[in-house]
Amino acid sequence: MDATAAPPATSTSKNLGLATLGAGLLIILGSIGSELADPLFILLIAAFALILYSIPRLHRLQAHADGAAGHWGARLVVFGGAVLILLGLTFLAWEAVGDAPDDPPAWANALFPIGFFSFLIGVIAFAIGSIRAKVFPTIGPALMIIGLVAGVAIDMATGAFFEDDGETTAWGFLIGIPTFGLGLAWIGYWLRGGGGPTTSSTTTPPTTTA
């Protein structure tokens, strides 16, 4: 299926588009804002909640044209995102009551890589499936892949990915995560009916007979 134009403006596509657009914008605001003020981390938790709502529905909207990559990618995104939301809410609760541990407990250290890499692999797989399905504009899922892969690669190269004290600026996080959010927002905006044709096509008008 080729995405030749923005979809009809149904209430379902509008709601899904709004949720996806909101997730993307919150990812951008939360990733940049949380570096300036810790409480703005709540924006990332809200973004992940919207992602858990949006991704499975985006998968269904592609009518399984995204193949196994989209199928399993959507499930990994939901699993990994749920784990990250749980951890984020737990640490926010600790901060709220003033009882945050100096070092994360062992169970949190074990759960974080599980949730993070499940989400990372899930997004990449889902985006690859979306590019294959050609239902959404290709630039949206492409930015999702570029953002996450580049973000992790940059922070691993600089050492920021492995630090807990934040002495090294996490440029990958500051650049890659907003790029990922931009990809989500692009899909959401398109679903809201604001997108234009993504491929050129010529349609032969139907002929009628008396």
Image: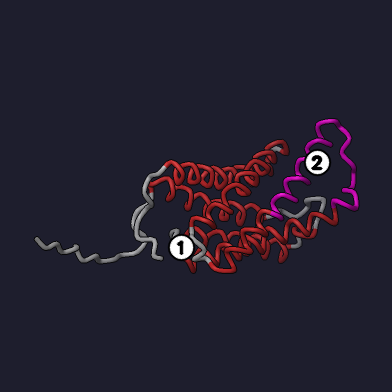
| Label 2: how many Cα within 10 Å (few below 14, some 14–19, many 20+) | some
Most extreme residue toward the left, as rendered?
Answer: 210
Query: Most prominent secondary structure in the magenta stretch?
Result: helix
Residue at the image position 71 percent from the left and 55 percent from the top: 79
Does the magenta segment cover residue 76?
Answer: no
Quadrant assignment for the C terminus: bottom left
Quadrant assignment for the N terminus: bottom left
Most extreme residue toward the front, as rendered?
Answer: 210
Residue at the image position 43 percent from the left and 41 percent from the top: 11
Does the magenta segment cover residue 81?
Answer: yes
Work out whether mark 2 precedes mark 1 in sequence or the reverse, and give the earlier one: 2
Coloration of the structure image: secondary structure
Give the answer, above or below, for where 133 lies relative to 15.
below
Classify residue 192 as left or right of residue 117: left
Spatial CA distance of label 2 from label 1 is 36 Å
Task: Report x, y in % for residue 205.
Answer: 19, 63
Number of numbered callouts drawn: 2
SS under mark 1: loop
Decide which of 42, 50 is in the foreground and name it: 50
Answer whether labels 2 and 1 touch (C-beta < 8 Å): no
Question: Which mark is drawn over residue 90?
Answer: 2
Classify residue 20 as left or right of residue 165: left
Q: Residue beneath label 1, please?
A: 138
| Label 1: how many Cα within 10 Å (few below 14, some 14–19, many 20+) | many
Task: Report x, y in % for residue 53.
Answer: 60, 47
Decide which of 153, 78 is in the foreground and name it: 78
Decide which of 70, 109 is in the foreground and name it: 70
Q: Amino acid at mark 2?
A: Thr
Q: Amino acid at mark 1?
A: Thr
Residue at the image position 64 percent from the left and 44 percent from the top: 49
The magenta span reads: 79-108
Q: Residue 154, can we see it?
A: no
